[in-house]
Image: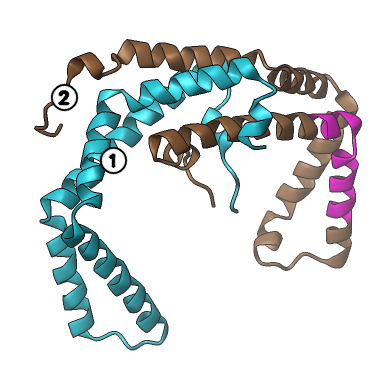
Chain colours: A cyan, B brown
Amino acid sequence: MTNANLNQLPELMAVTQALAENLLASEPFVIYQQASARFNADPQARGLIERLSQAQADLRRRQMGRGVTQTDVDQLRALQREVQSNDVIVDYVTTQQSAVAYLREINQEISLLIGSDFAALAGRSSC
Amino acid sequence: MSGFDLNELELAPPEVVRQAARDFAIALSETPQFKAYEEAIERLNHDAAAQRTIDAFQSKQQSLQAMLMLNAVSAADKAELQRLQNAFSSAPTVVAYAQAQADLMAICQASADWLSEAIGLNYAAACGSGCC
């Protein structure tokens, strides 16, 4: 179902929109958006994440081919330390965790009222 | 929290956000899809014949659990398990329940997709316990 199908449920559409607006204006999300904007505007931070992601993928490939050396591991650890000491990245990650924790509280509020886990009903099984 | 200035006048107070969540839950519970789902559960719970077919399938499945994990179930047991699964999945109340659940999930997914797009986080993935 797409948003177009929600058009047939105007009341649900209105409260979904209101909830989205309120979530966006909540403190955890405002702080997360600020951190997210700083991260997206920081080429160094983005580059570090891309390099880490690439290094992790390379290491996984080499593990499958049993070609991992101590130097590979040391380089990955050095990159991990660099990421962990980057304030923009750390702020982005921690504020995202706070936003997710808050979202879970909101989901619990919804789930208690409907008697089922809303997130589970909204999930798409990938298993 | 970050040290950045937040204009408190522009922030939604926690109680307002929670009220929006409650309004959403109430509206969801009043949709035809949600009511149909609840009715389907009720009918299924009171359908003794369907419950017996479900119990029979689950009982057989549990008795074969170790063999299923080892992928070592005999052809006869596989056929019996399939027959029991067909029996319960074709029971009218089970079919109605599955359809009602699919319809409800469709509107829940549409709402969650809307929320996800707005907040920049995948709602279901963020709140879900994961799978597998």
Residue beneath the point at 40% across and 23% down: A21
Residue A8, image x and y in percent? 70, 23
Residue drawn at (26%, 30%) of the image? A30
Distance, label 2 to label 1, CA atoms, is 17 Å
Disc 1: which residue: A96
Instruction: Work out whether residue B62 or residue B103 is closer to the camera in this orientation and state it.
Output: B103
Please tell me the numbered disc located at residue B6.
Answer: 2
- Can you say which quadrant of the picture contains the N terminus of chain B? top left
Tell me the crowding category of disc 2: few under 14, some 14 to 19, or many 20 or more residues within 10 angstroms, Cα based: few
Say if the magenta span includes residue B25: no
Question: Bounds of the magenta span?
Answer: B80-97
Q: Position of residue A77 (x, y in %)?
A: 17, 70
For label 1, count other residues whose C-alpha is less than 10 Å away and answer few (under 14), some (14-19) or many (20+).
many
In the foreground, A5 or A84:
A5
* Kind of residue indicated by mark 2: Leu
Image side of residue B85 versus residue A36, left or right: right
Where on the picture, by quarter, is residue A63? bottom left
Q: Position of residue B6 (x, y in %)?
A: 16, 24
For the stretch drawn in magenta, what is the main secondary structure?
A: helix
Residue B90 magenta-drawn?
yes
Residue sitting at x 84%, y 47%: B85
B67 above or below B25? below
Q: Secondary structure at mark 1?
A: helix
Q: Chain of mark 1?
A: A
In the rendered structure, the answer to whether residue A98 lies left or right of residue A85 reads: right
| Percent coordinates x, y for residue B11 in the rendering | 26, 19
Q: Chain of mark 2?
A: B
Say whether marks 2 and 1 touch (CB < 8 Å).
Answer: no
